[in-house]
Image (tube, rainbow, N blue to C red):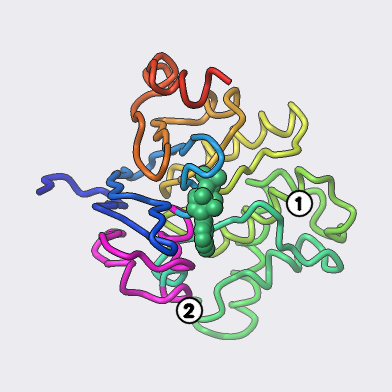
């Protein structure tokens, strides 16, 4: 029983792979404009949780409510259309296209534009691409082929390709892996900018970055919540130190 409207309400979520419960009776709630970070040792079930939310893996039992939609009953593409974006660890950008083209092809096809005239649509798309390019620090690189971007810039471009679809929930799997210190700082800045219109769930191992972005941290262990709360709270939790941070 909840008297609050969460963007995402995960309740009693379980998935078994041949009897092994990778996610085991998990419940957690994400607010509007919240950056939630999921941490935990390898094999804790972090990736599986994101796979369940985006519909790539089907739950054995439990529910995932996104606004007023029950995601466990929906197909992967329907979940995308409902406003859930997911970035995997390896960027899936088009290396031989420019930054502009990568963003342009990611603009939702079915989205209506005032007037519906082709030139108006083109202008609206162009404006939106420009806006996104500024957010992801690539406004000066619009004509650059994606293959010439740095590793960090490629990660930002992929985030931009998701942002142009305007997801209300954006899920990112280790977004700063392999980034330089300055790229990591700019990624924190980027997340703090885009959170104004959405909620974000991040899987992350880099504790410095977690400290910079997390509104709330969920620590997973063996498919269950080991600890949850502010970074300061979970960092000081003896259970967390024992199974994760102490290593
Ligand atoms: P994490 O992301 O926290 O490292 P995962 O979610 O990748 O953990 O994995 C959790 C557990 O579930 C691991 O023991 C993994 O081997 C297992 N697992 C994940 N996906 C599958 C699958 N499709 N089939 C069988 N076992 C899986």
> Where on the picture, by quarter, is residue 66?
bottom left
Crowding near the residue tagged with mark 2, few <14, some 14–19, many ≥20 C-alpha atoms within 10 Å: few
Magenta stretch: includes residue 77: yes
Name the mark on residue 209: none
Q: Position of residue 148 (x, y in %)?
A: 90, 53
Q: Nearer the viewer, residue 37 or 93?
A: 37
- Report if residue 140 lies within the magenta region: no
Indicate the quadrant containing the C terminus: top left, top right, bottom left or bottom right.
top right
Number of numbered callouts drawn: 2
Task: Give me the residue at 67% from left, 66% from top.
Answer: 126
Which disc, if any, is residue 154?
1
In the image, is the residue at mark 2 within 8 Å of ligand 1 by its beta carbon? no
40 left or right of 187 in image: left
- Residue 112 is tagged as 2
Q: Which residues are drawn in magenta?
A: 49-78
Q: Residue furthest front?
A: 19
Left or right: where does residue 134 sit relative to residue 19? right
- The structure residue drawn at horizontal position 39% and vertical position 35%, both measured from the top left corner, is 218
Whether residue 85 appears in this view of the structure is yes
* Residue 219 rendering spot, x and y as whole percentages: 42, 33
Alpha-carbon distance for marks 2 and 1?
A: 28 Å
- Label 1 element class: helix
Query: Which quadrant of the structure image shows residue 104?
Result: bottom right
Residue 70 vs 186, above or below: the answer is below
**Residue closer to the observer: 48 or 86:** 48
Say few, some or many: other residues with alpha carbon within 10 Å of mark 1 (under 14 / 14 to 19 / 20 or more): many
């Amino acid at each position: 029983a909840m008297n609050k409207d969460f963007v995402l309400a995960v309740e009693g979520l379980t998935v078994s792979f041949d009897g092994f419960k990778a996610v085991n009776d998990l419940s957690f709630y994400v607010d509007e404009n919240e950056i939630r970070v999921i941490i935990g040792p390898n094999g804790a079930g972090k990736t599986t949780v994101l796979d369940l939310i985006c519909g790539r893996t089907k739950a054995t039992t439990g529910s995932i409510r996104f606004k007023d939609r029950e995601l466990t009953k929906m197909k992967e593409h329907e979940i995308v259309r409902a406003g859930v974006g997911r970035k995997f660890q390896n960027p899936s950008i088009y290396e031989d296209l420019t930054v502009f083209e990568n963003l342009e092809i990611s603009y939702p096809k079915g989205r209506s534009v005032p007037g519906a005239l082709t030139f108006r649509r083109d202008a609206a798309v162009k404006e939106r691409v420009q806006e996104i390019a500024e957010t992801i620090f690539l406004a000066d690189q619009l004509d650059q082929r994606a293959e010439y971007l740095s590793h960090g810039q490629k990660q930002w471009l992929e985030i931009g390709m998701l942002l142009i679809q305007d997801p209300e929930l954006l899920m990112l799997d280790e977004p700063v892996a392999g980034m330089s210190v300055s790229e990591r700082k700019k990624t924190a800045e980027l997340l703090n900018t885009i959170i104004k219109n959405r909620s974000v769930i991040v899987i992350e191992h880099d504790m410095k970055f977690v400290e910079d972005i997390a509104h709330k941290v969920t620590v997973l262990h063996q498919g269950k919540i080991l600890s949850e709360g502010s970074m300061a709270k979970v960092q000081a939790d003896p259970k967390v130190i024992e199974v994760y941070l102490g290593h």
